[in-house]
Image (spheres, rainbow, N blue to C red):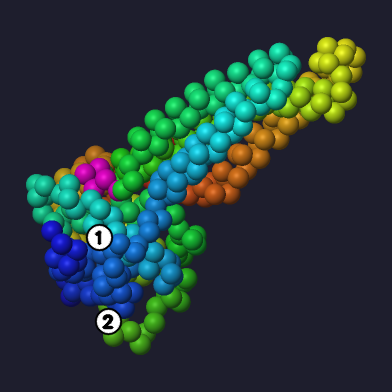
Amino acid sequence: MDLENIWKSSGESDKILHQALHKDISTMQSKLPLKKLKNSLLSGMVWAVLITAGYMALYFFVNIWQVYIALTTLIVFNIWIMIESWKLYKSIPETITPGLSVKQELEKNYAGFKDWWRIQQRVSLFVYPIAVAGGFILGGTLGSGKSVEAFLYKPQMLMILAITIAVVVPVCYFGAKWMFGIAYGKHLNNIKMLISELGNTV
Amino acid sequence: MSEKEFLSQLKEHQNIIYKLVRLYANSAEDKKDIYQEIVLQAWKTYPAFRGDAKFGTWLYRLCLNTIFTLQRKKNRIDYTDTSQYEEQLTTTSVNYEAERLYKAIRTLPETERAIISLHLDGYDNKEISGIIGITSNLTGVKLHRAKQQLANLLKDI
């Protein structure tokens, strides 16, 4: 018997497929990684809106111009990140695209994850340092009961601020990278390997 | 098209889903996830199916794209040596030859499994290269390599 015939006659079914074909489709939830990424982008945007609202509320309680500058900068960056996230959210399709080849579908997935990670890098580069500096000044002045000028008068305080930024920002950055690796690292490596199997490197 | 009509059309072509998932799933849980995702994706994308291609070809693409992009719970299975492959065979199988063929195909890299399955289902190199997204030359090379490996494993079929 030739292989084609063995192959063609082997296409039966099994109990698990039978169950899938008789299940109510409306109760099914997609487990596609890009769908998960979209959900994560959406929840990230919701948090960003809440945090930005929190920054705006702080305007009414704080009377320190340096903190105002930090808050304004943070709000501007947050809005920018939200716009970028929204654009990415809209650009990621919720479904497989049967019109694309396997390679194109894999590249689409890879690009989606890369774009998401680029946004996270922007957050860590632009938002974290300002948030840390603003939080340090606000916490320090409120805690000590001094003005900002008095609080930062001693050079040691500026030194501590610089060290805090130098420590917290990389910790947050590498923490995010580590979590991203745990969630999607293996999957991305698989995609990368499959694309390279198909003759391209990414 | 109603959900019922759609599912009955899908059932007519369920052998495609069955064969492809059997080549890639590593466990019953994995199978269940992939089957469900394929049914869901087919249902969601079917309205965009314009009938330019045959339904079977459309479903083939959809299955492969879903299988390749779905995150697996377990590591991919690659039987790197033939002794490991032989151990996996169950001689009591009803369709021993078919089982041997599946086990042999599963020794191939994932992309070559797709190429050989398309070839065994009667697609020519040009069609395969369009579905996979590689050149016809590369398809030919991969197909030749896959066939050689299968021939070594299935000498007596």
Counting residues from the start of the chain, the first of labels 2 and 1 encountered is 2
Give the quarter of the image for residue A17: bottom left
Q: Which residues are magenta?
A: A96-100
Disc 2 target residue: B95
Residue A74 seen anywhere in this rendered image of the structure: yes
A170 above or below B27? above
Residue, x 47% and y 71% (percent of image)? B84
Residue type of the residue flagged with mark 2? Asn
Q: Is the same chain shared between marks 2 and 1? A: yes
Q: Amino acid at mark 1?
A: Ser
Whether residue B34 appears in magenta in the rendering, the answer is no
Please indicate whether residue A196 sits to the left or right of residue A102 in the image: right
Of residues B44 and B37, the one nearer the viewer is B44
Residue A191, horizontal then vertical, whole percent: 43, 46
Secondary structure mostly seen in magenta is loop
Residue underneath mark 1: B117
The chain identifier of the residue carrying mark 2 reads B
